[in-house]
Amino acid sequence: MLSLVEIIIGGLLGLAGGAAGMWYWQRRRGLCASVFAAVPKPWQVVSPAGRTILANAALDTFFGGDERPIPEMLLEQVADEPEARRQIETIAEQAKRGLLGQAEVRVPAANGHGNGGYDWRFVAAYPLPDHPGYVYWVVDDITPRRQMEQIMREEQERFVDLLENAPVGFYSADAEGRFLFANHTLCEWLGVAHNDLELGRVRLHDVVEGLPAGARPYDPFGVPGASQGEVLLKDAKGETFRASIRQDLVTDENGEVHRTRSVVRDLSREMAMAAALEESEYRFEQLFARAPAGIALIGPDGTIQECNDALSRLVGREPQALRSVSLFDLVAKGDVEALKTALAPEAPQPARRQVPPLEVHLASEEGPVCTLFVNRTEGADGKLAGFVVHFIDSTEQKNLERQFAQSQKMQAVGQLAGGIAHDFNNLLTAMIGFSDLLLLRHRPGDQSFADIMQIKQNANRAANLVRQLLAFSRQQTLQPRLLNLTDILAELSHLLRRLIGENIELKMSHGRDLGMIKADQGQLEQVIINLAVNARDAMPEGGVLTIRTGNEKVEKRRKSKDESMPPGNYTVIEVVDSGIGIPPENLDRIFDPFFSTKEVGAGTGLGLSTVYGIVKQTGGYVFVDSVVGGGTTFAIFLPQVAEQVVAATLQDAEAQERRDLTGAGTLLLVEDEDAVRAFSARALRNKGYNVLEANSGETALKILEGEGDPIDLLVTDVVMPRLDGPSLVKEVRQTRPDLKVIFISGYAEDSFRKRLDEETGIHFLPKPFSLKQLAGKVKEVLGE
């Protein structure tokens, strides 16, 4: 793509010609480049064929490097917004006809913020007159302006509401006594409509009782030169009430009366209005004093004249102590200059009423973060009278923004971890599978038996590491089974004692009649080990590590910060240390990935985040209680399995252990990883099955279309190039709706089930798997 500078260079050289043209261009080349780079609004030139010819750097930043034409990118953003699409398409059509077009378009906000979840874009298309079909497109983010316009409209509506519904009447009459304006309050008192007054159907003297003859039409008093007085006003029903009128005359340069400015008080309602006014003032005071946002009235010199309780809580001082204090003394030093600019008395006219929001730290760089909204106030002479400053505590919002950014980062890391784990699971499936095949030929006592067992044991260890990686990204498929915590802790106790060292005493306290839980044993052991290691690091000088188990029946929903645990029966594991404790400011972050208070290189910050991921995926809850200098307690609540379910499961497990894994039938095995496919095919053939092999989804479809033996079971990988497992099953089910399917994958089971319209006859076997697990799953599915 040619840049605009390059095209201009060519044009100038062609015009100037020769060495003189080159000299002329070289002197101005830098200036032209600077001019185009300095244009702040994103722009581009689009050819008649719809290709981007020119664009500036601002456009590249605005659309993240996307070089497509502006209308194409905007139409993609507003795909679900019919009105916005119509506007953009209209501008594009006008541009093709050589007509200028522009609009302000509402687009969905990419980050969920903006004005009601939407951002606003200014879009304009300028056809180039000397280049038919070429269009100069401009786009700009006008969200802040639209938000400010909304604020101004609301302020105007409030002002109109105040004027119309004030507890006094306002009117303006011309020299002939015709009403030019009357507010809603006065119209209600008189019992007439706005139209009757302002269209001249009712004039001033029609509503004033007892005026002497000869009184001027605009005079309600009947006394020449009077500007205020009491009169009798009569309403549409003919009833009168006493009122006080204060009136100013607006005259022209010749002294002729142009109009009046008049204020009316209903004296018959004076006492009621006084009481209502007192109540209104009280309410305003309460709203000001108890507003959730900090409010301060600031003098022109920057000193606080009045402030409310919310501001005093923010800065930690009483309201009385803040009076006459400079606002600049309340913010961090690094934010003082920006605040001085916002409160500058010599602010230009357009900025006087629209000072942009300002983000500052209070008291210190580590103090609360506040967003300041500065509104200038002016006297009747138009000179600066002071400022009204609203303080919005945005500390929590900033924390949420940081957590959201961290969440996005960890989602990307989790996707990367899941992809790596998938590849490793393929390798480990082949290693474990071929080890099983070798063990069929090399029995205990054989010279090679020990070596093969070493290979298989190390492959199983690697499989555990991959499961931990998937647990971190929450993409693993757990293999839950009924577990007794007492047995698991008994087996772990020796390992835990070696992990925590000799200077830490390990105490085990087992609850009686613990309820059975359903969880993945390896992952649960990893949780306990991670918590034990974390406790060890919290007791560098030694101490006591206590692990307790017990049953707990939760009667009511239990909430603790972000956790909300429903009622039910739970088995509880408590890991208690006597260490240094966790400071309150770190408690909310201990489960964040990569968050660690240890020295660089002393920890990854993944231990507790892995604990959290495993417990949540198991259906449990984690609660933390810590006292600085007094130790920390991690309480893990795991839901108990009903007794009847436990009994039925144990019976099924005994029957499964004794069953014969041989079988008969024709299987179609689809796996793009050669080693996994080779092992699986051999293993199944050894068990008596006829196995057809396919290295891709396309090959599998060709086999199924053939006239060979009827296929009893389809065993397919989930992730394959081009035609993956779920897509293959959808194709097959169109002609063979009853064909049974086993998916094999290193990813979580949910990752493919969401893509299937139905689940009849669909089974899952997670990688890595052994020969026995593969044969057992096939036997189970074919036996249904």
Image: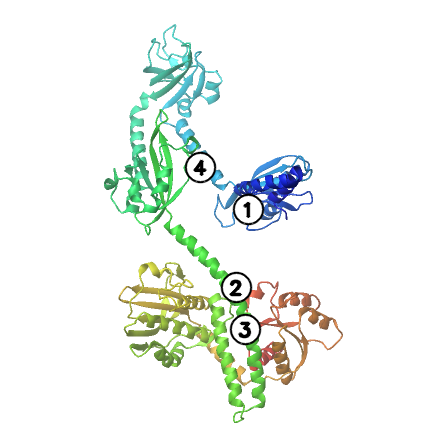
Residue 258 image point, x, y percent:
43, 13
Query: Which residue is disc 2 drawn over?
Result: 415
Q: Nearer the viewer, residue 250 or 483?
A: 250
Q: Residue furthest front?
A: 19
Helix, strand or loop for disc 1: helix
Q: Residue furthest left?
A: 321
Q: Residue furthest bottom?
A: 445
* Dot 2 crowding, Cα within 10 Å, few <14, some 14–19, many 20+: some
Residue sitting at 56 percent across and 40 percent down? 27
Query: Which residue is disc 3 drawn over?
Result: 424
Q: Are marks 4 and 3 in contact (CB under 8 Å)?
A: no
* Dot 4 crowding, Cα within 10 Å, few <14, some 14–19, many 20+: few
**Residue 151: assigned label:** 4
How far apart are the alpha carbons under marks 1 and 3? Answer: 43 Å
Query: Which residue is disc 1 drawn over?
Result: 57
How far apart are the alpha carbons under marks 4 and 2? Answer: 42 Å
How far apart are the alpha carbons under marks 4 and 3? Answer: 56 Å
Q: Nearer the viewer, residue 454 or 700?
A: 454
Q: Nearer the viewer, mark 4 or mark 1?
A: 1
Residue 286 image point, x, y percent:
30, 38
The picture quadrant where one finds residue 254 is: top left
Residue 242 in view, yes or no:
no
Residue 222 image point, x, y percent:
35, 9
Q: Sequence-wise, which precedes: disc 4 or disc 3?
A: 4
Q: Nearer the viewer, mark 4 or mark 3?
A: 3
How far apart are the alpha carbons under marks 3 and 2? Answer: 14 Å
Residue 253 in view, yes or no:
yes
Q: Are marks 4 and 2 in contact (CB under 8 Å)?
A: no
The picture quadrant where one finds residue 732 is: bottom right
**Residue 634: assigned label:** none
Residue sitting at 62 percent across and 74 percent down? 673
